[in-house]
Image (cartoon, coloured by chain):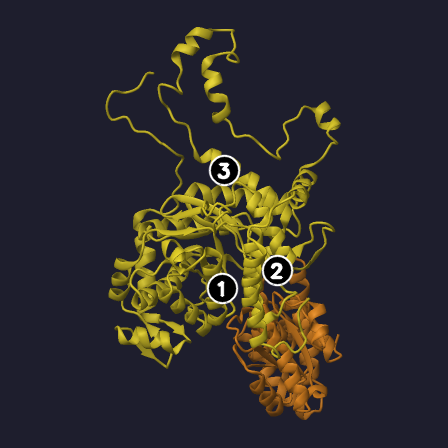
Chain colours: A yellow, B orange
Amino acid sequence: MEVHKVNYEVNATPTLQILTEDEIEAIYFSSLRVLEETGVRCYNPEGVDILHAHGAHVEDKNLVKVPSWMVERARSTLPKKVTVVGMPDKDGKRKYRMDLVKNSAYWGTGSDTPYTIDPYTLKRRRSTYQDVKNLAIIAEALPNIDFFMSLGITQDTAVGTYDRWQYLAMLEGTNKPINITAVDVEGLRDQLEMAYIRLGGKEEWKKAPAFSLYIEPVSPLSHDPIVIGKLLFCCDNDIPFVYTPCPQAGATAPCTLAGVLVQALTESLFGIVLSQLRKPGAQVIIGGLLSQMDMQTTVMAYGSPEMALLSAAYTDITKWLMVPMYNTSGCSDAKMFDEQAAMEATLNTFIAGLIGGNMIHDVGYIESGLTSSPDMLVACDEIIGMVKRFLQGIPVTRETVPLETIDQVGPGGHYLGTDHTLRHFKTEFWKPVLMDRLDWDRWVKAGSKPMRERVHQRVLEILQAEREPLFDEKMYKELRRICELADERHKGEEMGIGIV
Amino acid sequence: MSKILEQLATAIIEGDIDNTPKLVQKALDEGLEPLSILNDGMVMGMNEVGRRFKAGEMFVPEVLMSAEAMQAGLKILRPLLVSSGAKLLGKVIMATVQGDLHDIGKNLVGMMCEGAGFEVIDLGFDVPAERIVQAVKEHKPDIVGLSALLTTTMRQMAYTIKALEEAGLRDKVKVMVGGAPVDAEFAKKIGADGYGSNAAAGAELAKKLVGAA
């Protein structure tokens, strides 16, 4: 191979960078200024007390102003890597693992949509326990999905205790790491108890947590009392948590994308400071669903190029901060899995991969995060596959620049039978599962199926495949018991107004 | 249409908060009837805003500026209209229910209602049912608008409606509900009078509920 003997630089992978270091610093120091001078509202008195006791200024009961040195100090104890490991298989091994660290990409679903697309009728309706379980089963079967979030709220269970049932539905469907939601601290405690049971004890959790918790600040610059309670519980119990806002440029955040970055970072930095005061080393993931309010429809855009751009820029910031990033992709504003959904998901998945992860959520979202779609999830698995291939880049080595083989084949020959081809054809090319590359006649013979039909067929195949339960009846009963006890404690709060 | 009414309509369309009250005052000085100033000037402007918004020629921030201009003009007109016995669109109380801090949707509906000509009393977010009942007693609104973003706080809408019933106020007000997880079916289930799927639909619904559309 003809290479320079010295000063030879390689690109082991493609690279993408939105912000320069100077721009990142400008945003970071702007956030510090907002946190110190504008302050944030924290509606949780315990949280306010902790911050106040450690140097924050508090005005008007809950307006908290955090000096920059507190942020700097919090960063010194903040973990640079967060690991979440899934549940044990029958052999006791926990094989699914996420090491959330700079430039590592893991894809997973989004959480808690009120609606889902029924896999059999293709009608949009309120999501149920069975839907969550089905979607978890699909996620378990998809090779490019690394973690699961409940693609639908269980709405056929009690509203005030839905979270325990939802966790059970997810556990029934998948052993992959889960990012849960919780109604309140009690709901979180119950789910942690369920995880201990499923893991076979608290010690297993200590080796590696099996779920993280999703919680949000409310933009602009507000922190919910229950959410902060959950944050503190996570610190006390070694539960990693995602503390990320959903600012809408022009509505709940400044209209400019740089302004969104500053505000979102301010909101998450507040969570970082509080967590590190509560427990140095508490595991935090920041990022968010950063996007705009569509000024025509007032809908929060999930498929916009700005969403992808903001997520990528924010990832640059988290790399500089050395804190795991909660990214967004595989989502769309389309009302079904259609051409728009595919176009938007392809763009945002590609960008999220290129920028380097880390925990990339919302795969399977349509209708701006209000509906989950099994078809979208399965299609995105294929998109992620393509993106992952792209991310491998082109290694330029003696083996990949086969001068001898080229010389051997010479002008006019072919490469089909060469050793070099035999060595590489299985690993060099990405192999499509759903993408069609048939010639016309074979495509017609196969039923002339458009992508949409092939995707849906795959959904049905996965759901109809025989599968062993992930755990035995005794375990199921123990887990279910926690859900039932919660229902019992909260009996009478529902007023007979269950949503489904 | 007289020139001043035309100017007033234009000021509303352009969201001219400074000029609208001045033009209203000028129209009054010229001897125009308050009701005519409202209907033939300001409402004409707002109708055009609605048309342009639907056609994608105007966008939310511009519509909200028009709504603010509308309110600036109404500040002068409202007492005159009331004393002349003219029927106004009425009052709307807006609230994001208890346990929920998400208020952008509620704010948008409130501003759209102001644009339609309603007087809007905004109770803010995380508002318990008792405070809403208290506000209904105090302000005697025509409509109560409730918003929630979370399925867990959606229940508060039902609690609030029940609290209004228990206070004997339910038949005195119309209740409209909205928010991302809310839909028409849920609204019906909890006994609300209507559901709006977006801010403009919310304002339209409010007009319908007072028999003005």
Please, which chain is the residue tagged with disc 3 on? Answer: A
Nearer mark to the viewer, of 2 and 3: 3
Mark 2 touching mark 3, by CB under 8 A? no
SS category of the residue bearing label 1: helix
Helix, strand or loop status at disc 3: helix
Chain name for mark 2:
A
Which quadrant of the figure contains the N terminus of chain A? top left
Would you identify the image quadrant in which residue A406 lies? top left
Q: Which quadrant of the structure image shows residue B143?
A: bottom right
Circle 3 is placed at which residue position?
Answer: A387
* Residue B60 in picture, x, y percent from top left: 58, 64
The numbered mark, 2 or 1, whose residue comes first in the sequence reads 1
Structural distance between the alpha carbons of marks 2 and 3 = 31 Å
Q: Amino acid at mark 1?
A: Gln
How busy is the neighbourhood of tag 3: few (under 14 within 10 Å), some, or many (20 plus)?
A: many
Q: Position of residue A246 (x, y in %)?
A: 48, 61
- Chain under callout 1: A
Q: Residue at x 59, y 50 (%)?
A: A469
Residue that numbered label 2 is attached to: A297
Residue in the picture at 48% in, 12% down:
A418
Between marks 2 and 1, how big is the CA–CA gap? Answer: 37 Å
Residue A475 visible in the displayed image: yes
Q: Is residue B66 visible?
A: no
Amino acid type shown at disc 3? Val
* Distance Cα–Cα, label 1 vs label 3: 34 Å
Q: Say which mark, if any, is on residue A191.
A: 1
Nearer to us in this view, A241 or B137: A241
